[in-house]
Image (spheres, rainbow, N blue to C red):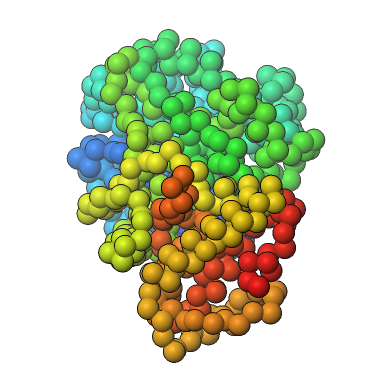
Amino acid sequence: MTYTDGSVEDFIIDYLKNNDEKDILNKENDGAIFHNFTESRENLLNWYPFNKQGSVLEIGAGMGALTKLLSEKCDRVVAVEMSQKRAEIIKLRCRDKKNVEIFTQDIKSLTLDEKFDYVLLIGVLEYAQVINKTKDSFVELLEKAKSFLRNDDSRLIIAIENKFGLKYWCGASEDHTGIPFDSINGYKDNNLVSTYKSNGVKTFSKVELENMLVHVGLKGIKYYYPLPDYKFPMTIFTDEGLPTYKDIQGIKFTYPMESELIAQESKLYEELLINNVFPFFSNSFLLETSINENADFNNIKKIYHKRDYDEKFRQITLLENDNVIKLPASYISKKHLDYSFENLKELSDKGISVIDFNKNENSYKVKFLPLKEASITFKQYLKEGNLIKALTMVDLLKENIIKSSCFTSELSDIHKKLDLNIDVNLGHVLKYGYVDMTFQNSFYTKDNTLIFFDQEWKIENIPLKYILYRAINYAYDQNNSKFKINIFFE
């Protein structure tokens, strides 16, 4: 069996021969094109600390959703794809990458003298029995992949759906068969004609995966839990960094049209987290494995991706031990990260409290502070009806905003885009407005201090009350406040 998306693959080949791939999403509204060309696919591994001098074997490379990324992360990439058309698509996408070699071959018959630092099975293991109809096909594929590892400290990296993922309990159709509850039922309905013609596909639970990996001698395992799934991850968690309910609230969940939803997934996580069963119900697994049982895995606990569709602004936030690390998602977004760093430095130079940070060439690192965001404290005061303390926080924020800039008589037109919904005199205009000086982008300490972080934007000639209203409005929840927002501007 050779997996195919049909005639759209011919369209992609013809398009890429004469066009840049970045424009393809604007030319054709097709699910397969979005699935393979959206930059969100890179979120799975664009944060991973590959050895720049390392080599990668990508088994089942598909249309190359990750291949270009890998070529920028490592010195050598070998992509294996059994579909001739898909291999052609990878060649076109990587035609300017001299460190990429592509093989159009079945993994069963693949023979290479070369060994690799990293071997990848991204969305491939579940098809093992479809490709190789033997009783032990899944174990055989793992053994084959393992055979290409350079040494005991090399990594086999696997991404696969969890058969018991929460979305499936809610009625989402199985990703490969299109049949709701198929994986939970142990694929007993797989004799039906599945939507995606993938009879024989099989995903696994965490326990089943670990048993297979240990069986083939991959005893060093680190688990990652991408949400909403491994294909389009926005946040990735680990056993050392499990999600909070606040983490879940920032994730958008979507489902195929074949789904028969009986519950709202986002509302179920709070109870799962309280009962410490999130890993069992994670929608997908990303596994970093090694022959070495005591492998020295990285110390990354959580990975957050900024939801910007414009590549210039996409950033990655890593929680590593007691540090928070900010990375550009690509070389294009590095300029914006540098700009954010300069904004923090400018505020610090003006005597405003900001998080301690250290910058190197491609990232900046800050010490993790075990403090609540100021917005949480502000919302609590509004909910309790404690107007005095809420006003104290607003006055403190205003003092910091005034300290950040001198005044000017000029006025930008940005105030025209602001729907204040209140009759307010715009008042003083700041020469430079740091519009991320908000309760959401600061910590509030016990000694009545705001400590600011993530200052991405600075705008010239902006009203002080624009920033103040923006900060209050973002933290304001009319359903849980005993005051109307107007009270802070009277």
Query: Which quadrant holds residue 227?
Result: top right
Against 73, is 288 above or below?
Answer: above
Above or below, 257 against 426 in this view is: above
Q: Where is residue 467 in the image (x, y as percent from the top left)?
A: 52, 70
Q: Can residue 171 be seen in this view?
A: yes
| Residue 7 visible, this orientation | no
Picture coordinates of residue 265 (x, y %)?
A: 69, 37
Residue drawn at x 67%, y 28% is 271
Count up the numbered dots.
Answer: 0
Residue in the image at 77% along x and 36% along y? 263
Residue 23 drawn at (x, y percent): 48, 66
Position of 218 with respect to 268 (left or right) is: left
Direction from residue 91 to residue 40 in the image, left or right? right
State the residue lying farthest toward the left: 53
Query: Image quadrant of residue 431?
Result: bottom left
Q: Name, please, the residue furthest toward the top.
A: 215
144 w.r.t. 471: above or below: above
Give the residue displayed 51% in from the left and 25% down from the top. 128
- Quarter of the figure that contains the N terminus: top right
Instruction: In the rendered view, tell whether residue 67 sits above or below residue 312.
Output: above
